[in-house]
Image (cartoon, rainbow, N blue to C red):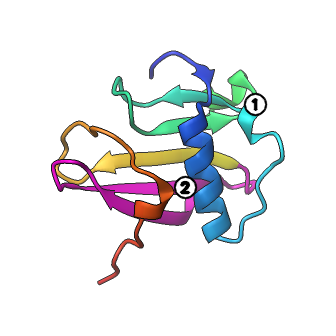
Amino acid sequence: MEEIRKINNKEVEIIKYLANKANYSIVSNIEQYLACPLTGEEYGSVILASEASLLRERIKKREISNCMFYDIDNSPVAMYLLVSENNDIYELDIWKCDGGKICHIPSLDSMQDIPTL
């Protein structure tokens, strides 16, 4: 895992978007959460918690919401919001479907539902 840092504005924006999409009542202090990046990339998955000690715990989690967009190279990028077994925000999972580096995250207007098979 990478260095623990404060959650950034883009992550807050995405989390709020995905939480709203799931009708999930988000905590009012989400901007104060800490993030532990799971990759060394500028954009990628992060574990989220209100306290640094909670970032190191292994817990059960479940997806509550998702969306996708197309990166500038037209490759799809999927984003998932996961909560802990206590129903607390736990992870923002972002990954490019071809395994490449995510170039940018567009405005929320560009987000689409992930198709189901």
Could you say which is closer to the camera, residue 20 or residue 89? 20
Q: Quadrant of residue 112?
A: bottom left
Q: Is residue 19 above or below residue 32?
A: below
Q: Secondary structure at mark 2?
A: strand
Camera-side residue of 30 and 52: 30
**Residue drawn at (70%, 30%) of the image:** 54
**Span of residues in magenta:** 59-88
The answer to whether residue 59 is visible is no
Q: Is residue 80 magenta?
A: yes
Instruction: Point out which mark residue 81 bears.
Output: 2
Number of dots carrying numbers: 2
Above or below, 80 relative to 35: below
Image quarter of residue 62: bottom right
Q: Identify residue type, mark 2.
A: Leu
Q: What residue do we see at 46% from left, 52% from top?
A: 107
Tell me which amino acid carries mark 1.
Gln
Neighbour class for label 2 at 10 Å: few (<14), some, many (≥20)? many
Measured as percent of width and height from the top left, residue 66 is found at: 48, 64
| 22 in the magenta segment | no
Mark 1, residue position: 32
Q: Is residue 29 above or below residue 111?
A: above
Task: Please indicate whether residue 47 sits to the left or right of residue 1 in the image.
Answer: right
Could you say where residue 33 lies in the image, as x and y percent from the top left? 71, 32
Horizontal side of 77 relative to 86 (left or right) equals: left
Mark 1 nearby-residue class (10 Å; few <14, some 14–19, many ≥20): some
**Figure quadrant of the C terminus:** bottom left
Horizontal and vertical percent position of residue 39: 37, 29
Marks 1/2: CA–CA distance: 17 Å
Image location of residue 91, percent across then percent down: 56, 45
The N terminus, quarter of image = top left
Residue 80 visible within the image: yes
